[in-house]
Amino acid sequence: MKKKTKENKELLRLDIVTALPDMFKSVFNSSIIKIAKKKKLVKIKLHNLHDYATDKFRHIDDTPYGGGAGMLIKCEPVFTCIEKLKSKRDYDQIIYLTADGEMLNQSIANELSMCRNIILIAGHYKGIDQRIRDVLVTREISVGDYVLSGGEIPAMLLADSIIRLIPGVIGDAESALDDSFQDGILEAPYYTKPADFRGCKVPEVLLSGNQKKINEWREEQALSKTKMRRPDLLGHYI
């Protein structure tokens, strides 16, 4: 067995296993994720499943046993890729993005942002062989009650939700702490200059300079918005 290598100073390493690595390049070279990479707070490695195919045509999928429409990603390329990664380092989580997984929420993002090494498996076609899920996967996450063409976009979404929480990624750390769902409810409305735009005025309390009253107003607004839009969240609010 190969000796596991020492990692660099990155706070998080994300290895993404996918059949379509080119889909990630624009997103991962823009905005907050680009900043995190530049600051060396995260390292993202894309692994093309076709590189681990066992035939000369680089096939990674096949028809399902028992019949049915669609194609499944085969065991061999996924096992080979992940076993190679695990021979070099230990992973906190091996996550498969799937519509029937646990629903992603802010609490999960917070938890995963404290991990050191994570593998994301982005399925495609009809999905992946169940044996991959049974043997390799440690967690299955869904981004909503709907079906997409593949796991690439959910993997991008999950990566963004995690990376933005890493200390030092966002310039103003308090900005992330004020986000919706961090306290279990939606966030209050925010305003910027000018104070009067075409007759639409900023609430007077926000111009008062009284931080205690501003905080009270924001909490009231957050609770009111949550009650109207997401009353299901109030049962978890303390």
Image: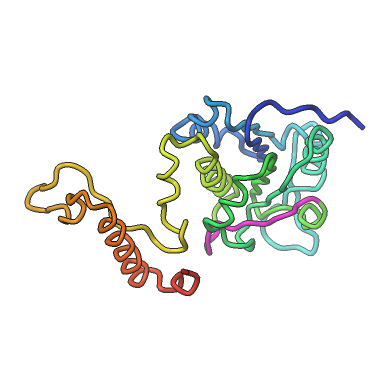
The residue at the far left in this view is: 199
Q: What stretch of residues is rendered in magenta?
A: 136-147
Q: Which residue is drawn at 36% across and 72% down?
A: 227
Q: Which residue is drawn at 40% across and 51% down?
A: 178
Snapshot quadrant of residue 17: top right
Residue 81 picture location, percent across and down: 78, 37
Q: Which of 25 and 129 is in front in this view?
A: 25
Residue 152, above or below 56? below
Q: Is residue 98 magenta?
A: no
Q: Nearer the viewer, residue 96 or 130?
A: 96
**What secondary structure do most residues of the magenta stretch adopt?**
loop
Could you tell whether 113 is left or right of 15 in the image? left
Could you tell whether 238 is left or right of 96 in the image? left
Could you tell whether 186 is left or right of 58 in the image? left
Q: Residue at x 33, y 62 (%)?
A: 219
Residue 52, above or below 111? above
